[in-house]
Amino acid sequence: MSLKSAIALEDGTVIHGKGFGSEGVSSGELVFNTSMSGYQEALTDPSYAGQILLFTYPLVGNYGINSLDFESGKIHARSFVVREACAKPEHYASGNTLSEFLEAFSIPGVSGVDTRFLTKKVRAHGVMPAAVQVFSKGYMGDDSLLALARAQASYSSEDFVLAVTSKAPSVHDVPNSSKHVVLIDCGVKRNILKSLNSMGIKVTVVPADLPSSDMLNLEPDGILVSNGPGDPERVTYAVDSVKKAIDSHVPVFGICLGHQILSIALGGKTFKLKFGHRGGNQPVKDLDTGRIFITSQNHGFATDPASMEGSEAYVSKLNLNDNTVEGLSSKEIAAFSVQYHPEASPGPMDSHYLFAEFMKLMDGKR
């Protein structure tokens, strides 16, 4: 069955193309990712909740879908937009095509459109609401699809963390574990958990809105605040937990959204970026050492550096593309954070050492 597709942007742009995945209609904030691979990890990253994901690389799906590269149990992006979706992947571990993968989770996919044009539009005007329909017949029409795109509530009006966080605590132990970390699940990627376990750390994953007293009663050696979707200003319950952890002298490590939450807990403010950082090639400078790292990123908000002046933390890392804040450190409290993803998946593993830094922090040696 041949599928067709259409995508409408809030500014009035409507583009028709081919469809793949599932028939249906979806809407969300259109964002782009510049990675050349890692589409399976990106689609299953909970940080894409509420968004339509566009890959800038022109051919997507050529190595299929395997059983190992899931970052969560399902696809979180509301739709997927590509220039060309490979229908016949070749890889020894592939079990499904990209189209079959989307169809299994009822996600409509758009292909055969000018993704360069769409990316340049987002770069020029910023991320914007969009709507997608994939159909074999019964197209709703350009005007109706455009109206759907424009009818969306502001992305910041919804708390997406509560939609993706764990429903109950779960324990992930390893033989002879030497530390116990409570992981506040704001939309955690599995490789964060695997990275901690690989270092001999027992991890208790807890819902993001679990009362801080319950987290501290677990007697953790440290607390890690994970990545996740949405506006950090809405995640007040996690901010409160970080404040209580700091007051209780429990070491804290924040990743991505967790970095923004730590910023707010220390009195800082965040703001929405024009089109965000999403991809595996973002250069970051460590201001303490002068070293440059190529990092994996997926975020649409950033910390206001001026708001951190006079706080207990200082800006320790900067993005070399736009000089936005990429990390916080402190000489006063046992806490640090990074805006990027040390666990990668996808992306370079240059920053995996940060998990060892967290171990040092819990040992009081950092």
Image (tube, rainbow, N blue to C red):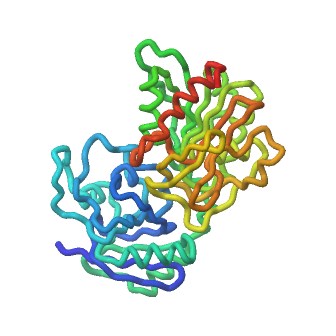
- 135 above or below 159? below
Q: Nearer the viewer, residue 82 or 344?
A: 344
Residue 75 location (% of width, % of height)? 38, 53
> In what quadrant of the picture does the C terminus appear?
top right
Seen at 50% across and 44% down, the residue is 341
In the image, taking residue 165 as reference, residue 72 lies left or right, namely: left
Q: Nearer the viewer, residue 47 or 355?
A: 355
- 95 above or below 62? above
Q: Judge whether residue 299 can be spotted in this image.
A: yes
In the image, taking residue 135 as reference, residue 230 lies left or right, namely: right
Seen at 26% across and 80% down, the residue is 137
Q: Nearer the viewer, residue 200 or 108?
A: 200
In the image, taking residue 214 as reference, residue 76 lies left or right, namely: left
Residue 70 location (% of width, % of height)? 35, 44
Q: Nearer the viewer, residue 290 or 222?
A: 290
Seen at 43% across and 63% down, the residue is 53
